[in-house]
Amino acid sequence: MSKSVTIRVPEELHAQLRERAEAEGTTVTALITEAAHNVVRDPRLDSAAEVFRTFIADNATAFDAAFPDEAPDRLDASGRAA
């Protein structure tokens, strides 16, 4: 079951939300709901994800050497295969 919440936002912000929702193929309500979920999310998840990313970055070469047939393609800064 969901609850209805009414908020007032400046017209400019509402226009930006509509524009973003349209670009993402979603609704303003969905964008605001996602933002609300992010506000109440456990902050430990953010730090855990960062620890994981750092661990992988620091140990990628060792993993690739240990499992050469399973080494993924590396991406450069633009997101393209290096």
Image (cartoon, grey):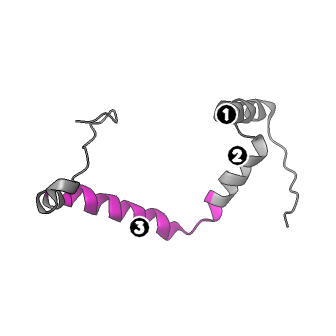
As drawn, the residue found furthest toward the front would be 69
Q: Amino acid at mark 2?
A: Leu
The quadrant of the picture occupied by the N terminus is bottom right
Question: Where on the picture, by quarter, is residue 36?
Answer: bottom right
Q: How many marks?
A: 3
The reply to whether discs 1 and 2 touch (Cβ–Cβ < 8 Å) is yes
Spot occupied by residue 46 in the image (x, y as percentages of width and height): 46, 62
Check disc 3 and report its element: helix, strand or loop.
helix
Note whether 32 is above or below 17 in the view shown.
below
Q: Is residue 45 above or below residue 77?
A: below
The residue where tag 2 is placed is: 31
Mark 1 → mark 2, Cα distance in angstroms: 8 Å
Give the mark nearest the N terminus, 2 or 3: 2
Residue 27 x %, y %: 76, 40
Name the residue located 64 percent from the left edge and 65 percent from the top edge.
40
Which residue is labeled 1 in the image?
A: 20
Which segment is the magenta one? 38-61
Local packing at callout 2 (Cα closer than 10 Å; few below 14, some 14-19, many 20+) is: some
- Residue in the foreground of this view, choosing between 41 and 61: 61
Amino acid type at circle 3 is Ala
Q: Which residue is mark 3?
A: 48
Query: From the viewer's perspective, is 67 left or right of 14?
Result: left
Q: Amino acid at mark 1?
A: Arg
Give the left or right position of residue 7, taking residue 39 as reference: right
